[in-house]
Amino acid sequence: MSALLEEAEAKLAPLSVARNLAWWESQVSATDENEERRTRAELAWSDALADAELFAHVKRERERGAGGEEERRLEILRNLMLPQQVPAELRAEIVELESSVEGRFSRHRGVVRGVEVDDTEIKRILRQSDDLAERREAWEASKTVGAEVADDVRRLARLRNEAARGLGYRDWFALSLAVDELDEGKLLETLQQADAATAEPFARWKGALDERLATRFGCAVSELRPWHYADPFFQELPPDGAVDLDGLFEGRDIVELSRRTFDGIELDVAGILGRSDLYPRGGKCQHAFCVDIDRGGDVRVLANVVANQESADTMLHELGHGVYDLGLSAELPWLLRSAHVVATEASAILFGSLARRRDWLQLVLGLGADEGADLADRLRASEAAELLVFARWVLVMNAFERGLYADPDRDLDALWWELVSRFQGVTPPDGRQAPDWAAKIHVAVVPVYYHSYLYGKIVALEIAAALEAAGGGIVDEPQAGARLRDELYAPGQSVRWDRLVEQVTGGPLAVASLAREVSAAVE
Ligand SMILES: [Zn+2]
């Protein structure tokens, strides 16, 4: 039996490296050649996981009940292989389509005032411009990629459903949760609780924001439309009404600040930074991610760093994934030497949120103690408001994807705006008929993932509370780094994610921590 697992790992590990490298190259430089290479590597990986004989063998061994670490390896292997047990033509079609849609996202640039602009420039306009026509153009430019890929994203959803149904699942949404070891009933219950905990404080906070926006733009609150908000999806805390920290980051070296943050807790990120691709450039992925290439120390970050608060949050977030990958115990067998999505998002979110915390601003950024004291209340309110904005956005994404996979042929444009109005309180543009949902890259290439951010956020709050209770918190506290490494990172997937979380935080994931946090949001 051990032989079965070792053989499987020996076969999968190099294919996984090739796949990760090809993916990295395709994101660093979105050329046709890199996209083709990536598709080939993805197919080779998928072919290996589709091996029906191996899958049957794994199934038999699981039924026999191996116990201990071997049983866990079999479980992880089964979860990897299950979605690939579909006809080869269908698998290939999905892989090729995903790769092609992602390539179009990387290459696409919106146009504002006749000039091609990247996502950073669109966001800058939405944060800063008082010119309503320009704002509207920027918002519309942020959605043009949606129109370009919508038909293929819809097709992808149909194909993914076909694969899931062939495996006996209701749809792709249900299959994704199952292989991520997430219980659908518990997820829906958690989302409902998050909705209940945030609806009222969000409405109050947003009511105050809308008043300020109406004053700023000289219109009635009822005339506010999506381009009055500070980012294309209203998924981030706007600088207005909170604490605009961007001024503090101007001219600062964000990468150096990130290195300094992790040095302070004795987690070494120099190796990661040396392998990374961190600054904006044409033909490059406009988002940010961290990838563990080989589960052996080659961890890289792709980012588009500029000198502002959001970039600091992003860098700390991605490095929060990176230190997790580096902290996985080298003793673990290959299959277990990886992180569960919820646990790694928790680590990432924990570090990302430091960039708006008083202790980090003082100790790492060098903000004076008096200024820190002046900001303290507003920082707390802004942290709570950020959580509200984020939670409402997750509710949109989750409900949309549930609807998408329940029926990919329904009127998705209408569903999208119905959910955006309900959960975010944003009024759709009059008479708009456009696939704005397809402009959100996750729907196409990271499907059924958004709830992991919410779970991750809740777990991050619980970990922060546990570290606080142990004394000192995180910033410049090496024992916090050691605890994260030993308790959260090192076990990898040898322990199921929900039990791991309990071990680290002292209790099961619960919305109570979120509810407590958001109560500070209303100024
Ligand atoms: Zn992340």
Image (cartoon, grey):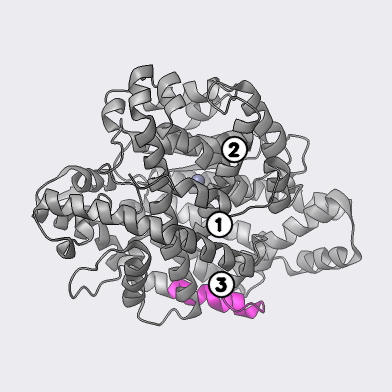
C-alpha gap between disc 2 and disc 3: 35 Å
Q: Which of marks 1 and 3 is nearer the N terminus?
A: 1
- Amino acid carrying mark 2 in the image: Ala
Q: Where 270 falls versus 311 (above or below)?
A: above
The residue mark sitting in front, 1 or 3, is 3
**Residue at disc 1, CB closer than 8 Å to ligand 1:** no
297 left or right of 75?
Answer: left
For the residues carrying marks 1 and 2, which lies nearer the camera in this image? 2
Q: Residue 163 colored magenta?
A: yes
Find residue 269 and report its horizontal and vertical position in percent.
Answer: 54, 26
Residue at image mark 3: 172
In space, the residues marked 1 and 2 are separated at their CA atoms by 40 Å
Q: Is residue 120 magenta?
A: no
Of the numbered discs 2 and 3, the one sitting upstream in the chain is 3
The range drawn in magenta is: 155-172
| Tag 1: amino acid | Glu
Front one among 331 and 400: 400
Going by the numbered disc 3, the residue's amino acid type is Trp
- Please state the horizontal and vertical placement of residue 288, each as a whole percent of the image: 42, 43
Residue 152: in sight, yes or no? yes
Q: Position of residue 455 (x, y in %)?
A: 56, 53
Q: Where is residue 262 in the image (x, y as percent from the top left)?
A: 53, 25
- Looking at the figure, which quarter contains the C terminus? top left
Disc 2 versus disc 3: nearer the observer: 2
Question: 79 or 497, which lies in front?
Answer: 497
Q: Which of 115 and 187 is in front in this view?
A: 187
- Mark sitting on residue 42: 1
Residue ID for mark 2:
465
Task: Give the residue at x 44% y 78%.
Answer: 408
229 left or right of 353?
A: left
